[in-house]
Image (tube, grey):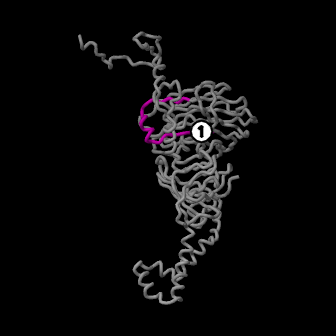
Amino acid sequence: MPDTSILNTAALSPLLPTDVLPIVRPGGAFGNRTTLADVLGLTQRRNLLVNGDARFARYGAAQTITTSWKYVFDRWLAVQPGAAGMSVSQVDGYGAGLGARHAWLFTQTSNAAGQLNFTQSLESIDAVRHQGKPVTLRFLVVKGSSWTAPNITASLYTGTGLDETAASIGSWTGSALAGQAVVVPTVAWQVFTLSANLGAGISQLGVVFQATPSGAAVDADSYLYLALVSITEGSVAPDAYPERSYDDELALCERWLPGWSSVGTQSWLPGYGIGQGSTAAALFLPFRRAARKSPTGIVVSNVGHVGVSDASGSVNGTNLTFNSASPEMGVVNFAAAASLVQYRPYGPYFNNAAGRLVFPGAEL
Amino acid sequence: MTTAWKFADSRRLAVFRLLDDGSCESCRADRADVQGWVEAGNVILDPDPPPAPSKDEADAAAARELLRVKALVAMTPAQVDAYIEQNITNIATAKDAIKTLAIAVSVLARRL
């Protein structure tokens, strides 16, 4: 009978990650059976975190962790309250075939025993989409032989407020610990996963990694690598890091931190300037992506790394200060020793391959 | 070593400081972290005095203050035409008009 061939899905028992499924090969032959978990793992899910693969370091590739929260990499904050003695750098990835192009290298520079916190939180507009659903955290770690923190605590926190600062993770309005794993890093790379069910009313979600140094003396092997951090929807971790394209990942980062990096000794900045006198010009720099909100300042790699050019020559800067910003445009005051001309249009550029200009203040 | 916050200019709307790695941070003076720094007992340094005007700027300012240049700037083309017709009557008045034009051109030509 035709109607008997239609499956009544409501009558089926739920599939579990350990259930075994057949694999159909091209041509219709049945191949080796595999688990549902493996099949789900083959499906590339979106990483809810941004810059989880340490691809971007537009605050600078090497950062000192301080006793106050600060953004150290795109979308990632760090702090070591009480007693700080650690740096963190974006480095080439390692991992013996684990697929990490970049990693974060935490280096103990003293025996300071303040607890390391390394965190990222989602905007509420993204967090609410996962209300009542399971999510899975996945990350890779390896330590040096003299890293003094005995373990790493990875925690998924939720909250019921709106866009509260990531620096308050764990104490947000309606804060709840959705899941926590205490793992022991070794001198060989390990992959850890943590699944958690999110509450039905959550509007904030974030992850924080914590490690408390023992206070023992440190040496050149007092380091820890962290790489390929992802949070994906579902209770099964993907079998590989859910990567986005370079442009997509950069666009997500720029929503939080507009800015540019130099690609040479004459690397043009998108925008224009106008002379305000012989020693001053205003530079108008449109952002590639609209920021979350108006930035409140700038960080420039060096005050001499920006110059301006007109049809006849160029002038290097002696200072660069914040003027104002909207979510779509930044304005900076450019100072030079001399040679600028009032009302003359100028093209701004980096005059140094290490040039970097970012507009912080749009972060959570 | 990170330097103290300093006002960017006499408007005192923005501040800047040099960081450990040689980079420079600048932001609005009323940003929360700057205000917290002040509330902790620190004082934002006064801005550097504005640079002395360059020769071009000084000459332009002097030219703008000349009454005959001010009068010329304020005239319509028809008024300029009428002024020349009515007032350039001898060598002395012609030299005076040429001086006014030369002063204006001298300043404007520096922007070419």
**Type of amino acid under label 1:** Phe
In the rendered image, the vertical position of residue A97 relative to residue A276, given as above or below: above
* A131 within the magenta span: yes
The x, y position of residue A326, in whole percent, is 47, 54
Chain letter of mark 1 equals A
The x, y position of residue A209, in whole percent, is 59, 35
Q: Secondary structure at mark 1?
A: strand
A227, A314: nearer the viewer: A314
The x, y position of residue A147, in whole percent, is 70, 32
Q: Image point 47% across, 11% down: which residue?
A: A32
Q: Quadrant of residue B35?
A: bottom right
Q: Image point 60% across, 48% down: which residue?
A: A356
* A8 within the magenta span: no
Residue that label 1 marks:
A118
Would you say residue B39 is visible in this rendering? no
A178, A31: nearer the viewer: A31
A214, B80: nearer the viewer: B80
Q: Point out the image quarter for the C terminus of chain B.
A: bottom right
The reply, left or right, for residue B60 in relation to residue B2 is left
The x, y position of residue A345, in whole percent, is 52, 60
Q: Which residues are magenta?
A: A116-138
Q: Quadrant of residue A93?
A: top right
Would you say residue A275 is visible in this rendering? yes
